[in-house]
Amino acid sequence: MARYLLATASVHTTAAAADYLADRLTADDEVLVVTVDEPDLDSRDAGDAANVARSRLLPATVEVLERAGEPAAEIRSVLAERAVDALLLGPRRGDPDAGGEGGESGADAPGSTVRSLLGDVTVPVVIVPTPEL
């Protein structure tokens, strides 16, 4: 049995994670999906992302955890509360056109949440590529 933590804010990130996990998941596995309600994001995005997870991550058991606050802090909190084997993230909020901060732009620039978590968590981190739209 494997337990994955998928941190997502969009259907794009969730779909990319589902593609990554497609050949890896079994009925014994569990995927914890954490969505974080941020003041500057449409709350429907997180709900849509959770719905995609419920439909695309079968045959694993999917549990959705809805949080509010700063994404990296909430992800760290879930990692402290739950035993997981790997953390899956998109390169940035889930918008394939969004760039990184500090003058970086383009699909290769990681967002602030990814930069905050890399090297600061005790589980392997998988950055799933989001598709170009």
Image (tube, rainbow, N blue to C red):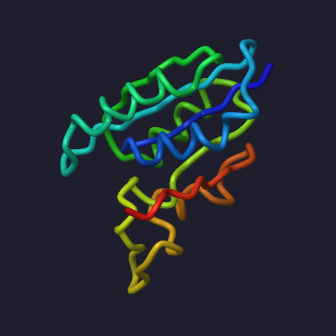
Quarter of the figure that contains the N terminus: top right
Q: Quadrant of the C terminus?
A: bottom left
Q: Position of residue 72 (x, y in %)?
A: 47, 49
Q: Return the residue nearer the eye: 122 or 5.
A: 5
Closer-to-camera residue (41/83): 41
The total number of labels drawn is 0
Q: Is residue 69 left or right of residue 120?
A: left
Q: Residue at x 60, y 33 (%)?
A: 5
Instruction: Name the quadrant containing residue 24.
Output: top right
Q: Residue at x 32, y 35 (%)?
A: 46
- Within the image, what quadrant is residue 101 found in? bottom left
- On the image, the x and y values in percent for residue 121 come to 67, 48
Q: Residue at x 45, y 38 (%)?
A: 74
Q: Outermost residue toward the bottom? A: 103
Q: Is residue 121 above or below residue 34?
A: below
- 40 or 95, which lies in front? 95
Residue, x 51% and y 60% (percent of image)? 91
57 or 102, which is in the foreground?
Answer: 57
In this rendering, would 18 be left or right of 99? right
Q: Position of residue 73 (x, y in %)?
A: 46, 44
x and y percent of residue 10 in the render?
Answer: 37, 44
Residue at the extreme front: 133
